[in-house]
Structure formats: C-alpha cells, structure tokens
Image: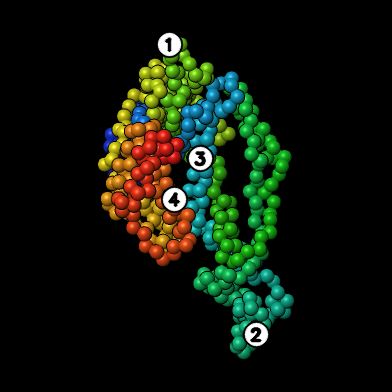
Amino acid sequence: MAEFTPRETVSELDRYIIGQTAAKRAVAVALRNRWRRQQLEPGMREEVYPKNILLIGPTGVGKTEIARRLAKLSDAPFIKVEATKFTEVGYVGRDVESIIRDLTDMAVKMGWERSKKEMRHKAEELAEERLLDILLPQSPNAQSGKEQHPMELIFGQGATGAAEPTAPPTESNTRQKFRRLLREGKLDNREVEIEIREPRTTPSLEVFTPQGMEGVGISIQDMLGGMLGGGKPQKHRTAIKDALEMLTDEEASKLVDRDKSKKEAVERVEQSGIVFLDELDKVCNRFEGGRSGGDVSREGVQRDLLPLVEGTTVSTKHGMVRTDHILFIASGAFQLSKPSDLLPELQGRLPIRVELKSLGVEEFVRILSEPENALTRQYSALLATEGVHLSFREDAIRAIAEIATQVNETTENIGARRLHTVLEKLLDELSFTATERRNERVVIDADYVRAQLKDLANNEDLSRFIL
C-alpha cells in the first residue's frame, strides 16, 4: 500500500472503471490512511480507527467493479462478501463471524505463498540436489571404480561416440556435468520417477454450531483430518522440467516456518484487513404501511454486524482475531429501501457515504472504448481465435451506447450490464458462423447496429425480455 498515493490509486482504477470519481477518491484515501496509521507510534496507532465507507448507487454503475480492482491493487488481506449470504444467529446458515474466519484463512494462504516465494532460491538448490540424486543412482560401474559418461547414463551405451577415457572422472565431475545439462534445459523432456509427499487433505465439511461454539466445529474438522491421515509419499513419473518444479515447491514448503507465517497473517488481518460488504440494502427492513415486511432475520443480520464493524474478537482456527482496525466498505443499490432504513447504530459505523451516479450515453461510449478490458476488445480477441478480424467504428460504439441507454430508460435500469446483453445480441449471428468465416474482416458500423437491434430496441415488450 505504501507504493500507491491516493492519486495513483485513482489513476489505476481509471484504467478499468469509467467515472465515479467521488467513490474512487474515498476508497483511495481509505487505502492510504491504512499506510499512514502504520507510521504512527504504537500508542497513537491503537487510537486511530478506520473510517468505514458506504457506497450508494443503482446496479451496474461500478460498485462491485471497484471492489474487484481494489483487491488486486491492495497488498492487504481482502475479502468480498454478500450480506444476503448470512443469517441471524439461531437460523440455519452462516453467521457474520465467518467473514473474519474466511478473511483470516485467505491471509494465511497469502502469507504462506509469500513465504514460499522468499524461500524459492534456496528451495531450487535443494530440489536440484534431490533430482541429481535420482538421476545418478549408485551403479555397478561406480562400485567397480569405472564411471559412465553422463550422456551414456541417459541415452545408453556408446551414446557419446567417443573413445573410453583412460582415466575415469570422479563422481563430482559427473554430477557437475549433469548439473550443467539440467540447467541448460537439455534434460527437460526426459522422464523421471520422483516421490512427493502429498499434503494432508480433509473432505469439505461445514459444521453449523451455536454462537460462541464455533471452535467446536473447527476441532471436529481437525480431528477428522488427523483420523484420515495423509501426507504419505506418492510416486510420480513425469518430465524432468515438471519434476524440478514439484520438488522445488515441496522443498519451499519445508523451509517455511508455519507458526511464524500464521502469526504474521493474523497480525496483517488485524492491522490492514479489508472487508467489502456488498448488497447491504438487501438486509434492510422495508416499512410498508407502518409495519416492517420481508424476512424476519434481516434486522438480526444487521445487529450481528454491529459488533463486527465496531470491534470485537472472533475465534478462528488460527487464533483469536480482533476486528477493531479492519476496514469495512459496504455497498448497496438502495432502490427499494434507503440508508436511513438501516439500524441507527450501523449507520453511525459507516460515516463516509458516497453516492455513485447513473450512467448515460457518454459514459457508455467511454466504457466501450477506453478501458483496457473494454467489451469491444474482449469480443475482438475472442473472434480472433477463429481467424475473424472484428473491429468497431466510432459511430457503431455510439449507436450501441444510445440503444443501451434507451432500453435502460424504458425498462429496468441495470446500468453498464445492459451493454453485455446488447452486444451479445448484436454479435449473435457472427459468433455462431465465425468458424465458417476464417480470415474474414468484419467492420461493425452504425447501420449494422441499427439493422440488427432497431426492432428489439423500439419494441418495449421484446426489449424487456430479450435485451
């Protein structure tokens, strides 16, 4: 996080997300504040709590996309969850504390991979020695004091085409020759049999336990894993190139200090963890005629979220995790409800509110042409695999944007997601016949767009069910 200033974070998000500058700025400042807090003295650091964010806006304007890109930008433990997946304590389903358990699991995995990467250089050396031990077994010739040439060991007697040396080389010389062949890649395609200790695997099992007894479920899983055993060496016959990679991975795993890695992961979750809580509006109580309607457990989910957002201690299989300094970014469309329908206590724990704007023709034009992952570029790349060269003219992109905006206005407004349905319908025939049009160049212009979509766009009933 220290590498990105707020301006740089916004610039990175601009590569994939059009508009919504206010939301990008809020997220960028929140990320930078995580780094700023780490620079404080310990006493002040404990007193600085994160300012949680609530993103408000209709569907398809970029709330979820901001979360996806944020996860790639931040080197911090990050998890995106939907509020609708959780239920109030006492109902069958997942409780909100599983958010922190999942975040901790993810952080431990991140830390494990990072530690393995740090140990990779030493692991490569150890793996190379193990592979040389396999390639150079003790042979009868070695016992009699006669050494074979490395090429003869691999390709058979007489493979060198040279006269037998008068003075046999030492074993170290033979090993060095093999090492050179291995590093030059001349042995990559030869097969070798190796033994790899498979990691212990436990069948997927989720145990639902009453609140406060989550550790019981964790203990049951660990107990079953121990009873089922695992970790026995398994023989694999594979190419030397792949064998070296497998041995390197195993050696790196041996070099990692598991306890230290786990402890660092828990600390990273507590100090710099980020939770993106999507669809928060779906757990709002809607007041109809003075009476609350909908699922009775909605308000219960909010009540369970309160201590999590404010700061509590959650029991995980990696230890106790404090949530006081975890940053929560919540989002919701709030079309059938409004932020004031949330519990007042939860509203107070989401002090920064940012409203995302609806998208129109100009935004759609930019979405189709500017981002690195623009839909037009995606479709061109997909059809290029069939040998079809697809390109979009500027007037075609504007025509697509206008039709998508028109359909959004006459039916449900689903934002930029409408572009997916419009483009899919526009290129339906071309996608179906692409295999028969190899080496053909196809240029999409405004006339083609209107010819394909005019009837659907003008007929509200058809556009409602097709577009």
The answer to whether mark 3 and mark 2 are in CB contact below 8 A is no
* Marked residue nearer the N-terminal end (1 or 3): 3
Q: Nearer the viewer, mark 3 or mark 4?
A: 4
Q: CA distance from mark 1 to mark 4?
A: 47 Å
- At label 2, which amino acid type do we have? Gly
* CA neighbours of label 3 inside 10 A, class few (<14), some (14 to 19), many (20+): some
Secondary-structure class at tag 2:
loop
| Secondary structure at numbered mark 1 | loop
Label 3: state its secondary structure. Answer: helix
Closer to the chain start, of discs 1 and 4, is: 1
Q: How many neighbours does mark 1 have within 10 angstroms: few (below 14), some (14-19), or many (20 or more)?
A: few
Nearer to us of marks 1 and 3 is 1
Spatial CA distance of label 2 from label 1 is: 95 Å
Q: How is the structure coloured here?
A: rainbow
| Residue 341, percent from left and from top | 40, 18
Q: Is residue 15 above or below residue 343?
A: below
**Residue 59 horizontal/vertical position (percent):** 39, 33
- What's the residue type where badge 4 is placed? Asp
Which residue has dot 1 on it? Answer: 289
Q: Which numbered circle lies on residue 158? A: 2
